[in-house]
Amino acid sequence: MASGVEQDKSLQSICYKRGSLQLLDQRKLPLETIYLEIRHTKDGWTAIRDMVVRGAPAIAIAAALSLAVEASNLGAFNGTSDDAASFLSNKLEYLISSRPTAVNLSDAATKLKDIIQKAASNASEAQTVFQAYIKAAEVMLEDDVASNKAIGSYGARFLQKQHNDSEKLSILTHCNTGSLATAGYGTALGVIRALHADGVLGRAFCTETRPFNQGSRLTAFELVHDNIPATLIADSAAAALMKTGKVNAVIVGADRVAANGDTANKIGTYSLALCAVHHGIPFYVAAPLTSIDLSLSSGQEIVIEERSAKELLNARGGLGEQVAASGISVWNPAFDITPANIISGIITEKVVITKDGSDSFDIKSFILKVLSKE
Ligand code: MRU
């Protein structure tokens, strides 16, 4: 990964044009805006593992595009279309291993592998397969922003319908689910952006999101950038804030949603959902359909990534000076599972999935219903 390409301050985490990919180094935000040049899948894998780029949709797109730039700049390739397909499929497998919990990356890889296989069976030239791959990865980048805007508008409309009094809505969110975590606009933060654009947002509250501080560094940065009225709270202040009555709804993103609606998201999400239930506050997940994993019947099957002890032992999510006592052992799961029974609804780009009184969601039926209307 080559470093040090300075660009204007921006909320764009992924800068791509054919043959060239730069990722905003989110570890340096909010103090520095530095883009790193990504030349091939190894650079992409390292950038994802080391949190240069993070957030489920952004990880998937950055991974896909890191292989697209490698394919664009490959030069001569001695092999058939089948060889090209195997080359690309192996690289996709490697990219999936960078971070296991977010399903968007493996979902993207599966879709891309299908496209590669089809291209290989219809052509004998390797270049045709590479071009089909590059085009498909580029479409993923374009589609993500449109999908986030749809999540924002469905979510904002739904919340306004639920909340039929004249007061503006104040929303608590966790982690960073905004422009930086996606190709642009964001999911849960996209709903907040849409409420603000509609003139009905009272205030956004964002948690610090320890230990990596995606909330205080990234979400706060986006909210200030967009002039959205917002307040930062310590993670441990969430219950006290809810008790004041100042929060109308909690909205978070997702890394993986099982078929029954159990949701893996940033560590601390489960605590927020429990607090929300206690205070009678609705708790929503906002995520694209690519975050839903219908192959898993419940959240118990979701593999939770554990990260380095250093994230807790040292300041700035492991990048700064030591703050914890030497010798202490550490448990640092990056995500937790919020059970479906305490989730009020799942806001997607096609539909808001609700439960109709039962304890879990029937996501498959919702999706089939939507697809049958298209
Ligand atoms: O460890 P991170 O920063 O990748 O975790 C991100 C989250 O948990 C987000 O809430 C989730 O990926 C949704 S991003 C639109």
Image (cartoon, rainbow, N blue to C red):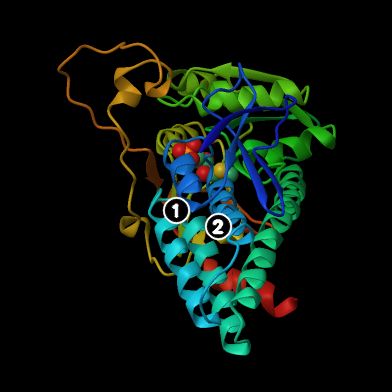
Q: From the viewer's side, name the closer residue of 177 and 75.
A: 75
Q: Secondary structure at mark 1?
A: helix
CA distance for labels 1 and 2: 35 Å
Q: Secondary structure at mark 2?
A: helix
Q: Which mark is residue 67?
A: 2
Within 8 Å: ligand 1 and the Cβ of disc 2?
A: no
Residue at 52% x, 28% y is 214
Q: Contact, CB < 8 Å: mark 1 with mark 2?
A: no
Residue 198 relative to residue 150: left or right: right
- The image shows residue 49, relative to residue 91, as above or below, that is above
x and y, in percent, of residue 194 in the image: 77, 40
Q: Which mark is residue 120?
A: none
Residue 44 relative to residue 169: left or right: left
Q: Quadrant of residue 331?
A: top left
Q: Label 1: which residue?
A: 340
Question: What's the residue type where badge 2 is placed?
Answer: Leu
Q: From the viewer's side, name the closer residue of 75 and 343.
A: 75
x and y, in percent, of residue 121 in the image: 57, 88
Question: What's the residue type where badge 1 is placed?
Answer: Ala
Residue at 14% x, 17% y is 327
- The image shows residue 191, relative to residue 71, as above or below, that is above
